[in-house]
Amino acid sequence: MRSADVLATRLFAAGCRYAFGMPGGEVLTIVDALETAGIRFILIKHENAAGFMAEGVYHRTGAPGILVATLGPGVANAVNVIANADQDRVPLIFLTGCVDDDEAHTYTHQVFDHRAILEPITRATFTLSAQSADIIADKAVNLAITARPGPVHIDVPISVADMPVKSTGEILRAPQSATAPAPGPDLDEARQWLGTAKKPIMIIGVDVLSEGSSDTAKEFARKYRIPVLTTYKAKGVLPEDDVLALGGVGLSPVAERELLPFVEEADLIICAGYDPIEMRTGWRNAWDAKKQNVIDITTAPNTHYMHQASLSFVCNIAAGLNAISEGVAPSSTWDTGRFDDVRSRLNQAYRVDEDWGPAAIVKTVRAAMPKDAVATVDSGAHRILLSQVWQCYEPHGLLQSTGLCTMGCALPLAMGAKIASPDTSVVAFSGDAGLLMCLGELATVAELKLPITIIVFVDASLSLIEVKQRGRQLKNAGVDFGEVDFAATGNALGGNGITVTSRQELMSALDHAASADNFTLIGCIIDRQAYDGRL
Ligand SMILES: Cc1ncc(C[n+]2csc(CCOP(=O)(O)OP(=O)(O)O)c2C)c(N)n1
């Protein structure tokens, strides 16, 4: 075995079946080893998109994603998606080639210090050494998947990849954090609060997904009749047609106006895997832990200082919820009619009944897709509205970048999800600027024959930024651009392209997409400034 084979077989053992990237001569052995180990290498057009495809696979399989880039420009192109994996808590193994140490002292072409650039945005960065390839691979997987998950980088010197390795040790996995809160006065107090709270509320975040605690969180909310707010990533942990589901929160001041009052009114706030990296400033100190009972059940100690808690348990989320509920009967007295009222006021604010516009588009697509469809969404005004309006019935039902909030993620996330689960319906939503950032990947979708639906909100404007610019009464500059014919683009790049301007046309385009054998790109023409008043 070459050391690259050791690395690859250990990634296979961790459940990895796909790797995405763009090779250079320096990573050819890695590509060969991955394929030999049973990990399919998928060639993409841009390393940034490759990282998001790997993330899409992770959301469907639970195994870490793999991104492969060559030295120099390949690494530089991937920095954005590595930062995303860091902020969005995505387990991602980043394999890069590099020149051998001896070479680097006298050779400068394309050479810079990969590890120095990646160090602040990864859980760890390693240089592979042949005889420790097994240990490094196992450490990388453990660091990537253990709370909180994130990216791990392995730089593979060209000659090390090919070095023969005598033997490889057994696979070493760190135990997962099945830790429960220690018995003691804090736990007693938490139980007492839960057993007496008349108006408890839960805020559920991404760590619930990473920890496999979704079902426990859902059952907990239902058993104790606790209304639930989720971050955008945790949408669907409680199906959003449940009377207790108050919806997603994070980036919409309109939603906050209606929903933060529930937080203020609550006599017990239970944060379950709530990582505030997804939240705008409105959520900084959204409660006063001295006046309200707040239980933070979290996988990592609070170093963010976005909020404080009265009791904090650093543990596995399901184990924490189980521990505080042991022997405790429900005591909630919320009038659930109020939840229906607030939902209908929010729907009015988002104008979901409009004839045509961004909310009409989201509603029309949701109605046409099966409940278990996976949706992805890019960054921008359309994303904030969609995250409020799109209903999820399962965890990982809506994929997006909510920590880094980068543009250019929706299409590749959808590709990864479809590759990993071909039988699931997948739809990507993007602003026109966001899709233009990763347009080349449409050619990859066509090559792979992935029948995904891609919805583009065409308004020839960076709407989210234009709204802010107008809000500050600055002159219009640098936010508008030419309208693109996305239907023609979709056809040119090997799929189907359709332009629509009404619900009716959109419905028939979706019909067409449902039976297509390749991608369908639907350009939805909307008015400029269509998001005014509803973000
Ligand atoms: C890579 C990157 N560059 C810039 C931004 C800042 N930004 C956030 S939203 C946005 C506008 C996106 O425009 P579009 O894709 O057309 O979506 P819309 O806001 O119109 O819905 C910009 C430029 C970002 N989030 N990511």
Image (cartoon, helix red, strand yellow):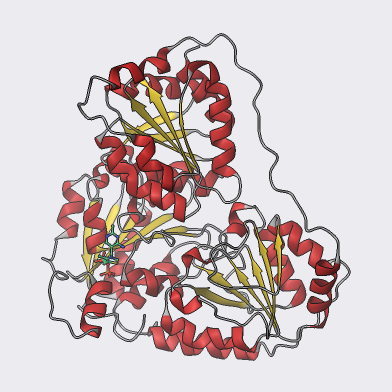
x and y percent of residue 356 in the render? Answer: 29, 79
x and y percent of residue 475 in the render? Answer: 13, 81
Residue located at (30% from left, 28% from top): 23
Residue located at (55% from left, 63% from top): 275
User: Is residue 462 visible in this depiction of the protein?
Assistant: yes
Residue located at (54% from left, 28% from top): 137
x and y percent of residue 363 in the render? Answer: 40, 74
Q: Quadrant location of ligand 1?
A: bottom left
Indicate whether 65 appears above or below 170.
Answer: below
Q: Quadrant of residue 474?
A: bottom left
Indicate whether 532 appears above or below 6.
Answer: below
User: Is residue 15 visible in this depiction of the protein?
Assistant: no
Q: Quadrant of residue 427?
A: bottom left
424 or 99, which lies in front? 99
Q: Quadrant of the C terminus?
A: bottom left
x and y percent of residue 494 in the render? Answer: 22, 44
Left-right relation of 409 to 202:
left
Indicate whether 390 appears above or below 340.
Answer: above
Left-right relation of 163 to 478:
right
Residue located at (19% from left, 58% from top): 487
